[in-house]
Image: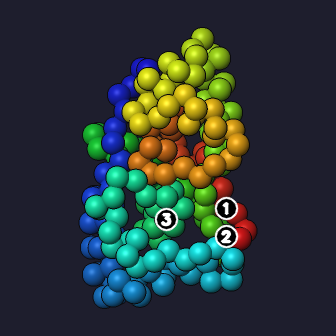
Amino acid sequence: MTNPLHDFDMKALHATLDAERRARHLSWIELTAEINEPFAHSSSIPISVATIRDMPNKRSVASAVILQILRWLGRTPESFLSGPELALAPSEIVPDPGPSRILRFDTRAMHGALNAERVKRGMKWKQIAGELPGFTEGMLTNLANGPLIAFPGVMMITQWLGQPAANFVRGYKR
C-alpha cells in the first residue's frame, strides 16, 4: 500500500445532510421523500426516515442509501473522507443515472480492478485483506459474485485501488 487510507466520516455526511435539509426548510419526512424520488416508479424498497436519521449511530450503512444521499447533495464520497481534501476532476463525480434509476456499486467491476492490482503487485488475496481494515479474504473474493457492499468499507477499497468511487458506481433500473 502506498497511500494511507482515510476513514469515511458518516457523522460529517449526516451533518451536511441535516444542514442542507434545514437550509431548504424540509422536515425529515420531506427530505426522505426527495431522496427516494428515483424509487417512485421502481420495485426497490425506499429508504426509511429512520435509516437516514440514525446514520451517525451505525457502524455501516448500505451503499445504496449513501449513494442516493450523495446524489441528492451533489457530493462525492471522497468529499467525506477524513484527512486532506481531495481535488476531483468532473469525471470523478458520481454519475447521474437518470430518472427511476438507483445508484449501486458494481462489485464485479470492483473485484476485477482488485484482482488486476493484486496480480500487478504480486499479492495474495489474504495480503490485500490485511491492508484493508474490516475485510477478509473471502469478502474480497466474493465481490466477484455481485453482492451489495456497505459504507464505510467500500471507500477503503477504492482508496487502496487509487481510483475514485465513481469509477464503480452504476445506475440500475429497478
Percent across and percent down for residue 170 are 66, 56
Labels 1 & 2 near each other (Cβ < 8 A): yes
User: Badge 2: few (under 14), some or many (20 or more) residues near its Cα, within 10 Å?
Assistant: many
3 or 2: mark nearer the eye: 3
Answer with left or right where residue 65 lies relative to residue 143.
left
* Residue furthest top as drawn: 122
Identify the residue position indicated by label 1 in the image: 171
Kind of residue at badge 2 = Arg
Q: What residue is shown with label 3? A: 65
Amino acid type at mark 3: Val
Q: Secondary structure at mark 2?
A: strand
Q: In the image, residue 88 lies at what x, y percent?
A: 46, 46
SS class, disc 3: helix
- In the image, residue 65 above or below residue 120: below
Q: Residue at x 27, y 81 (%)?
A: 22
- Which residue position holds label 2? 101
- Specify few, some or many for label 1: CA neighbours under 10 Å numbering under 14, 14-19, or 20 or more: some
Please identify, in this view, whether the residue under mark 3 or under mark 1 is nearer the observer: 3
Q: Residues within 10 Å of mark 3 (few under 14, many from 20)?
A: many
**Inter-mark Cα distance, 3 to 1:** 13 Å
Residue 3 is situated, as x and y percent measured from the top left of the image, at 39, 25
- Are the residues tagged 3 and 2 within 8 Å (C-beta)? no
Residue drawn at the location 71% of the way across and 71% of the way down: 174
Instruction: Determine whether, in the image, residue 129 is placed left or right of residue 101.
Output: left
Secondary structure beneath label 1: strand
Q: Quarter holding the N terminus?
A: top left
Q: Position of residue 171 (x, y in %)?
A: 67, 62
